[in-house]
Image (tube, rainbow, N blue to C red):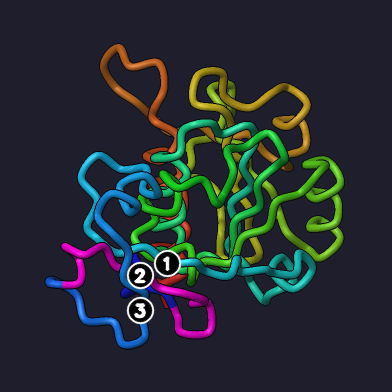
Amino acid sequence: MVSETPTEFLHTIYLSETGAKNFDYPGAEIISDKIYKNLSDTVNPQGVLAIVKMPKYNYEEVVGKSNALLIFLENLQDPGNLGTIMRTAEAAGCAGIIADKNTVDLFNPKVVRSTMGAIYRMPFVSVESLDDAVKKAKDKGVKFYAAHLKGKKTCYECDYKTSTAFLIGNEGNGLTDAAADLADEKILIPMDGKAESLNAAMATGILVYEAKRQRMII
């Protein structure tokens, strides 16, 4: 992750005594293995830590991009899911991720690690009110789709070529009724077998890549 960090975000790099034998970061500070172990929250740390500035993004600029493809998250709790969604969003060409205040901290160490560097490249904003955030985006022409088991259409029957946002809910409970009702349309990901739902990150990937596929068609 340190190697993925843009230089403008790097403040200080620390290497453990063991890590200094494996990494070459000019100007890095060397600390004892014991102190390093106390600072790290992983079982098998690599030997390098850094103090990094937090990226900050403007909500209006993120949602106001031309033909923006956006992800709005409500009460997502699993750090690995959020990190995977950030990586997938970057790969699919999304303009940004908007998370409500009940979603896991975007700077949770597990989230940061699971983004594999995407946290430095994918714009994201945490908002107090999902309702207000959606209304502001709608004012900018964004159309909202809620991934929902009660969807009338499948996710393959809608047009995502213009400014589009997908509402994704909690891993166990999905979107609240209030959040789902904010959508212009509820959509369903078709499933065979006895599966009742998909992992939040998997569902997000299916939706944003369908949007990407449509936008690639000339």
Q: Is residue 29 visible?
A: yes
Of residues 12 and 54, the one nearer the viewer is: 12
Of residues 157 and 62, the one nearer the viewer is: 62
First in sequence, mark 2 or 3: give its number: 2
Residue at (40, 49) in percent of width and height: 39
Do labels 2 and 1 touch, CB within 8 Å? Answer: yes
Residue wearing tag 2: 2
Crowd band around label 2 with a 10 angstrom C-alpha radius: few (<14), some (14–19), many (20+) = some
User: Where is residue 151, by image quadrant?
Assistant: top right
Q: Which stretch is magenta? A: 6-20
Q: Work out which residue is located at the far left of the displayed protein and give it.
A: 21
From this view, report whether residue 13 is shown above or below residue 148.
Answer: below
State the mark number for residue 97. Answer: none
Residue wearing tag 3: 28
Three-letter code for the amino acid on which mark 1 is drawn: Ala
Residue wearing tag 1: 50
